Image: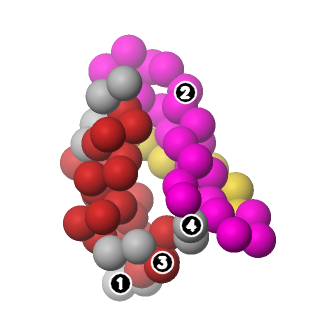
């Protein structure tokens, strides 16, 4: 299974649907749909997804969507 599929599945477990991933030189920005209320979220990661462990990625996303 491709590594990016794992991150998409983790977003789905958190109630999000990944729409786009914007790749910059030093970070990723994920555009996701919050399934509960159909809001679009822009989640800026501190670095690229593949540089983060799956647990760190999940905790970071969870902290951003709880605000």
Q: Is residue 26 magenta?
A: yes
- Tag 3 secondary structure: helix
- Tag 2 secondary structure: strand
Residue at 32%, 40% in the rendered image: 63
Q: Is residue 51 above or below residue 66?
A: below
In which quadrant of the rendered image does the C terminus lie?
Answer: top left
Q: CA distance from mark 4 to mark 3?
A: 9 Å
Residue that numbered label 1 is attached to = 1
Residue that numbered label 4 is attached to = 47
Residue that numbered label 3 is attached to = 50
Residue 35, visible in the rendered structure: no
- Tag 4 secondary structure: loop
Disc 1 and disc 4 in contact, CB within 8 angstroms: no
Q: Which residues are magenta?
A: 24-46
Residue 42, visible in the rendered structure: yes
Find residue 28 and report its image quarter: bottom right
Please state if 19 lies on the left or on the right of 12 as rendered.
Answer: right
Camera-side residue of 34 and 25: 25
**Location of residue 53 in the rendering, given as x and y in whole percent from the top left corner:** 32, 75
Q: CA distance from mark 4 to mark 2?
A: 21 Å
Q: Mark 1 vs mark 4: which is more N-terminal? A: 1
Q: Which mark is residue 40?
A: 2
**Location of residue 22 in the rendering, given as x and y in whole percent from the top left corner:** 70, 56
**Location of residue 30 in the rendering, given as x and y in whole percent from the top left corner:** 57, 49
């Amino acid at each position: 299974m491709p590594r990016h599929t794992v991150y998409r599945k983790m977003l789905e477990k958190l109630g999000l649907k990944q729409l786009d991933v914007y790749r910059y030189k030093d970070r990723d920005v994920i555009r996701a749909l919050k399934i509960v209320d159909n809001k679009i979220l822009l989640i800026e990661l501190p670095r690229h997804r593949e540089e983060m462990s799956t647990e760190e990625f999940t905790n970071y996303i969870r902290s951003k969507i709880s605000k």
